[in-house]
């Protein structure tokens, strides 16, 4: 399975993107990881999640009550799988990365795929819209090389394949994550696509997007 669906976006952003960090997965490396991904088993995933104590931070059904931590329920399984690979390899910085790296270090790829399959099948909470009017930035801004959010995350923020769902995400986590991409504290995105976009966003725009998509 190739990442052809993001080729137009990379073409748009290519000249603005910094050189990929050595530790970050590029498209060829992700294609290779995806080709080697085991088939996930949701039942085993539920057991791994319980045995690992994941619910202590992320909630028993993948909905973290602490808003600084991410909602995992209903997240795209391929994205969850990639994030677990990235945590285990030390590609993610900031936040609770050290804790997650330690947790992920105990998992093999089969367990990662199982957990991703179980979480991906859980119901995802909806957004608690602060306003019914979407932020103007939702449509993108070509003057700043900011594509519409739906180009990667879908018309309703539901994500697609390895690109994450952002609707229903905890607002505080949403803001913190985009801010880390903006400031360079997180750089594990494929070809730095999110980092390129986030650097163009203002703090107010990040808050507006979190208010629209988040809970």
Image (spheres, helix red, strand yellow):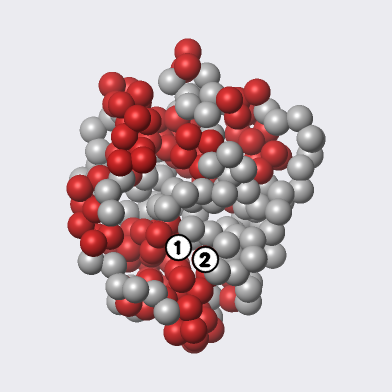
Whether residue 73 is visible to the viewer of this picture, yes or no, is yes
Q: Is residue 191 left or right of residue 53?
A: left
Mark seen at residue 120? 2
Give residue 198's position: percent from left, percent from top: 48, 32
Nearest to the observer: residue 163 or residue 178: 163
Q: CA distance from mark 1 to mark 2?
A: 5 Å
In the displayed image of the protein, which residue is found farthest to the right?
131
Residue beneath disc 1? 77
Q: Secondary structure at mark 2?
A: helix
Give residue 196's position: percent from left, percent from top: 39, 30
Q: Does the residue at mark 1 contact the one at mark 2 (Cβ under 8 Å)?
A: yes
At x 58% / y 39%, what residue is drawn? 155
Is 212 drawn above or below residue 50 in the view shown?
above
Q: Quadrant of the N terminus?
A: bottom left
Q: Quadrant of residue 82?
A: bottom left
Q: Upstream in the sequence, badge 1 or badge 2?
A: 1
Disc 1 crowd rating (10 Å Cα; few below 14, some 14-19, many 20+) is many
Q: Quadrant of residue 5?
A: top left
């Amino acid at each position: 399975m190739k990442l052809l669906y993001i080729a137009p976006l990379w073409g748009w952003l290519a000249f603005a993107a910094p050189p990929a960090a050595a530790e970050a997965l590029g498209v060829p490396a992700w294609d290779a990881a995806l080709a080697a991904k085991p088939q996930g088993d949701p039942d085993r995933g539920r057991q791994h999640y319980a045995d690992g104590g994941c619910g202590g931070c992320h909630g028993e059904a993948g909905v973290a009550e602490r808003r600084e931590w991410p909602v995992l329920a209903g997240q795209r399984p391929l994205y969850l799988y990639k994030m677990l690979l990235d945590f285990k390899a030390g590609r993610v910085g900031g936040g609770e990365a050290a804790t997650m790296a330690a947790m992920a270090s105990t998992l093999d790829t089969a367990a990662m795929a199982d957990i991703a399959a179980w979480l991906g099948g859980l119901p995802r909470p909806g957004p608690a819209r602060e306003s019914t009017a979407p932020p103007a930035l939702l449509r993108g801004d070509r003057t700043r090389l900011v594509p519409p959010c739906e180009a990667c995350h879908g018309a309703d923020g539901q994500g697609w394949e390895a690109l994450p769902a952002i609707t229903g995400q905890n607002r505080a986590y949403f803001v913190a994550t985009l801010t880390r991409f903006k400031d360079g504290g997180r750089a594990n995105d494929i070809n730095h696509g999110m980092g390129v976009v986030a650097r163009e966003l203002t703090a107010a725009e990040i808050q507006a997007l979190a208010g629209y998509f988040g809970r």
